[in-house]
Amino acid sequence: MIATIARKEFLEIVRDGRFKWTAALMVLLLVTSLLAGWQRFNSYSQIQATAQGSTNTQWLKQGDKNPHTAAHYGNYAFKPLGPLAFFDSGIVNYAGTAVFMEAHKQNFPIARPATDTSAVARFGELNGAMILQVLLPLLIIFLGFTAFSGERETGTLRQLMSMGVSRGSLLWGKAAGIAAAVLLVVLPCLAVGALALAATGLQTAGGGIWTRVALIGGAYLGYAAVFLFLTLAVSAWANTARAALMALVGFWAFTAFIMPKTAAEVSRLVEPSPAFGTFMAEMKEHQKRGIDGISPRIRIAEYRGELFRKYGVSRVQDLPLYWTAVSMQKLEELDHPVFEQHYNAVRDEYAQQLRLQDRLGVLAPLLPLRSISMTLSGTDLIQHNKFMAETEVFRRNMVLKMNTYLSQAAANLNGVNSATNYMVANEDVFAIVPPFRYEPPALRDIVASQAGNFTLLAGWLLAAIALALVAVKRMSLERN
Amino acid sequence: MYRLIISHETRSLARTGALWAILALLVFAIGFAAFAGGRAIARQARGAADAVAFENGERAKMRQDTEAYAAEVAASGGTYEFATVNHVPGRGPPQGTNAGVVGAETAAYVALPPTGLAALSIGQSDVQLNYLPASMGTTLDMIKNLETENPVNLQTGPFDIAFVVIFLLPIFILAMTYDLLSSEKERGTLAMILAHPVSLRELMASKIVARATVILAVVVGFGLLALLSVGTQLDQAETWLRFALWIVATLLYSLFWFSLAVLVNVYGKSSATNGTILAGIWLILVVVVPTLVSLLATTLYPAPSRMDLIVAAREAQTAGEKNMGSALDRFYSEHMDQVPTGDQRAMDFLTLAQANAANIEQALLPLYEQFREQSLHQEGLVQRFQYLSPAIMMQLALNEISGTSTARYQDFLDQAFRFRGQWNDFFASRFLKREPLRPEDYDQFPSFSYVPEPLATVLGRLATSLAGLLLVCAGVTLLPFAGLRRYQVAAR
């Protein structure tokens, strides 16, 4: 019985004029966006790999110089992307793609592509994720809002029920019919996307790429099903087809456009983050003041005393380590807790903001889906934070290695006349700093971080199905 | 007759819950957007103020040192001398006497002041920092940093009044008008009404006027309230001119959506079909076309990668360094505190460091020009394609009116770069001549004052978008009234 209803629903939709138009538009946009995303990802990855290779060489070939000066010259880390970025570019355009790693300073990521685009880019980026998040639900609404309300208006609903169809099987049949019509549009496009992915991504993907694809696919399927059952529920509930349409389009606009921005503003309100100028001024003041209120100058003097006692000497000249290098490393380490406090505060504020936005997903199923999609595509905040954290690990190691080398190699220069008071290192010394490598977080951790969002989405699905069942049970067969 | 129908329509509208629900949502959205926009602008202003205060504090300390030193010199009868770079504190002249140190180690922040309407349309102002540090480094050092804002929120975009007007207002308008004639026809009341001495055109016009009056009164009224609650420069005539333009743009944009609903109604399909068609058109004009235009702009004229720019800058830096005197000079370049008093090489070094920055700047200039060129191409393309969607025209217009457009920012950048040149020259010339900075010289430091663009320039840029809106509006308004002739008033 369900199969018969599904076939009837499917044929009716596919033969309708609105299906042809919406399907054509959908296919056009989805294929365009996937191909454009594919081209962008390839171009980005190529530039990123070349740039990282070039800076690694530049570090080694920076010319003979003092190791500490080399640490000032520093190195750049360019953020690599996983292949699924072609489908969901997430925060890539807004998060910064490069970090300068230098002595004495932790830096924010720079080079955000969003700064080099026209204002019209703020309407959003046309990518696969955006189409499935925003346009797919509307397609489902357009195809399904007359499912019950239309039949009621034309009087066929009563006829149908008189033939002994159970209300449950009517719901499932209609759901299957609409789903088949939607999949008819979406699946071929996604096949194109999968081919594009297979053509480029696999060598850079690492493990678990198809697991990611399956999880993303499952999440989007669940999201689409939420809208399918909500559409059927409202269609059964509403008095007229146009009332059903109004309610559904209203909910769609609410979840796709109003809620994401509202959630962002609310999260900013609850957990504000400082402006750039404020952040920098506060951090620099704190650096000068010292983490615990004792200025670095005093700390360095204390440290010199410690070293004197440790080595049983009373003059810098007698120290077995090059004091300049040792003191610079000490200064560096005095700054570490200050950096941690300030940068981690910002990082945590962002994370709190996102958590709050995810939780507001109880009002709009788009919010948990958006996070799942970005995270599994490797273009989210978690991975951005991991990238930043790894650049800081690299930076500290680079500075430590250079200062330590200098402190030992120049030990004989303590107190020596300034004209000869420097040492020069070459490429071999710079090579003790291994090149920057970014290891994306393990798939297991990523999936675990999204457990709440998956639960929320599952909750939405169950609620939508329950709502549809109740609505169909109570559905009146006549307009009232 | 018009008056009678309008008052009847208004009264019957007032009796439906839908109108009040829509108006309540609209008022709430405007209020929330004004609040959020006001906070965003205040945050920017605070960031700028904190950055300025910090750098000014640094310079004030240097000045205090020079004052103390000047007093000491005057008391002891010695000569006021030029400090070498960062010697041991407590001996000799303070750092504040060295123009090279003051100019390179402190920055003068230049700021683009927001217009009185900035909170209404955030535009690109959240990704284009409106306060930039000018120092003796390179131009690119000025513009590398951005606002420390959650990238997720940047990607989502602000909930500002421009969003309410461009995205939500059409939805509210369409919700009130999608069944303008079709519902009366479906209920069978349309034929009855037309049995009275009233034409379909009169009826239609009255229905639109009734709805438009209500919605626009709310938009303009609450828009004004929003402006009053967040406005920064309400005392200026220009703010009010900008607000008037904002109202004109909003009226035109609203008129377009009202007329579109009429146009679809004239084709005489069922309410449900009208709703579907209008929702589809909204989606295409407000979401699909703008994102496609953006895709087209960035695909045809992709900005060169900033990653390439960074690599090129380092290439130039290395080349410059390899030309620099000796390894010692290089070491001192990072550690001026290690330079002993009176070390001539340290002085030479700062001179060289200056030359080095100039080298990098020279090498990067062509690349930077490429950025600007591509960005101009992109803007040009968007300007040409904006006529495809009233939403794009409206966004460009609102950004221009609120002073958050890319063009205004580019003009600010030009001024900021010129100022960096002045700042650099002021300190470099004194430094190279080894002229000690005296306390009173601190009053002579170049200071930045933003020169607003002439209003005519702003209006000129605005004119294209507004004219486009007007044209589209006129087209969509006239079409349905011509088509009404053939309207079928009763179901067949």
Image: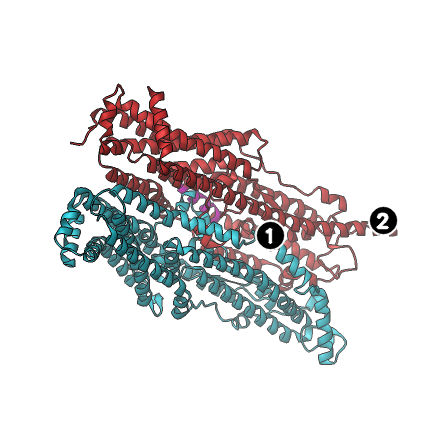
Viewer-proximal residue, A475 or A87? A475
Viewer-side residue, B441 vs B386: B386
Q: Do dots 2 and 1 share one subunit?
A: no
SS label for mark 1? helix
Residue at 14% from the left image edge and 58% from the top image edge: A1
Q: Which of pointers 2 and 1 indicates the residue nearer the eye?
A: 1
Residue B473 placement: quadrant: top left
* Amino acid residing under circle 1: Thr
Chain A tint in image: cyan
Residue B181 spot, x, y in % from top left: 26, 31
Which residue: 59% across, 31% down? B235
Q: Which residues are magenta?
A: B367-378
Mark 1 surroundings within 10 Å by alpha-carbon count, few (fewer than 14), some (14 through 19), many (20 or more): many
Please give the chain letter of the residue carrying mark 2.
Answer: B
Cα separation, mark 2 vs mark 1, equals 39 Å
Depth check, front residue: A328 or A446: A446
Within 10 angstroms of label 2, few (less than 14), some, or many (20 or more) residues? Answer: few
Q: Which mark is residue B74?
A: 2
Label 1 marks a residue whose chain is A
Q: Is A451 included in the stretch rendered in magenta? A: no
Q: Main secondary structure of the magenta part?
A: helix
Residue A224 x, y percent position in the rendering = 29, 55
Q: Is residue B12 visible?
A: yes
Residue B90 in the image: above or below residue B224: below
In the picture, measured across the screen, residue B357 lies left or right of residue A5, that is: right
Residue type at numbered disc 2: Ala
Q: Is residue B83 left or right of residue A265?
A: right
Looking at the image, do the residues carrying marks 2 and 1 touch, with CB atoms under 8 Å apart?
Answer: no
Quickly name the residue at label 1: A278
Chain letter for red?
A: B
